[in-house]
């Protein structure tokens, strides 16, 4: 099963630094990847402009190598940006305690990769479940 959410890692980090800090850190990492993506666009432009009109074979390699590197950076940055944005969004959507409504104030109890035994038909199953306990009222639910 394709799992681009790495539930283990997410649960570990939330446990260590708390949900609020995990969420902002994940958004920050996402934007670093967006910067990588933009850098890739710049590198493509440099390869195209600075190394134009290639004559010798090594000039071809330099030009298309640079542009290929730029394209890799764009793809790498963009996919990682999307994955992290979705990850942050997905968990944030469920970060309110269903009982008392407090946002992001919970402890990780356990986690798993299988879909939770929890009737949430909208669960996209793209990510594993993380069972959390509200710090205020003790309610348990999955994020
Ligand atoms: Zn609560």
Image (tube, rainbow, N blue to C red):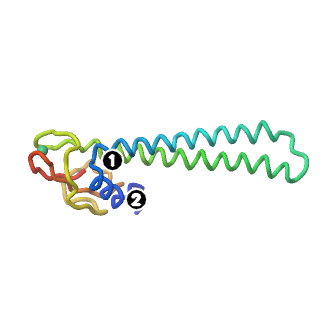
In this rendering, would 104 be left or right of 99? right
* Cβ of mark 1 under 8 A from ligand 1: no
Toward the left, the furthest residue is 137
Q: Residue 48 in the image: x percent, y percent?
A: 76, 39
> Which residue is labeled 2 in the image?
3
Q: Residue 22 has which mark?
A: 1
Toward the front, the furthest residue is 17
Ranked by sequence position, the earlier of labels 1 and 2 is 2
**What residue is at 65 percent from the left and 46 percent from the top?**
71
In this rendering, would 10 be left or right of 107? right
**What residue is at 20 percent from the left and 41 percent from the top?**
96
Toward the right, the furthest residue is 55
Q: Secondary structure at mark 1?
A: helix
Asked if the residue at tag 2 contacts the one at tag 1, i.e. Cβ–Cβ closer than 8 Å, the answer is: no
Q: Residues within 10 Å of mark 2 (few under 14, many from 20)?
A: few
Split into 4 quadrants, where in the image is the N terminus? bottom left
Q: Residue 93 in the image: x percent, y percent?
A: 28, 41
Q: Residue 86 in the image: x percent, y percent?
A: 39, 45
């Amino acid at each position: 099963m394709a799992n681009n959410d790495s539930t283990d890692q997410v649960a570990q980090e939330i446990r260590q630094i708390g949900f609020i800090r995990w969420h902002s850190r994940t958004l920050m990492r996402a934007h670093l990847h967006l910067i990588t993506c933009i850098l890739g666009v710049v590198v493509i432009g440099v390869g195209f402009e600075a190394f134009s009109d290639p004559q010798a074979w090594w000039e071809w390699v330099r030009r298309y190598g640079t542009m290929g590197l730029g394209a890799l950076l764009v793809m790498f940055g963009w996919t990682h940006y999307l994955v992290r944005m979705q990850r942050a969004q997905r968990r944030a959507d469920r970060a309110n305690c269903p009982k008392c409504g407090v946002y992001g104030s919970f402890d990780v109890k356990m986690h798993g990769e299988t879909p939770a035994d929890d009737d949430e038909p909208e669960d996209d199953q793209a990510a594993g479940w993380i069972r959390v306990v509200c710090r205020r009222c003790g309610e348990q639910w999955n994020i």
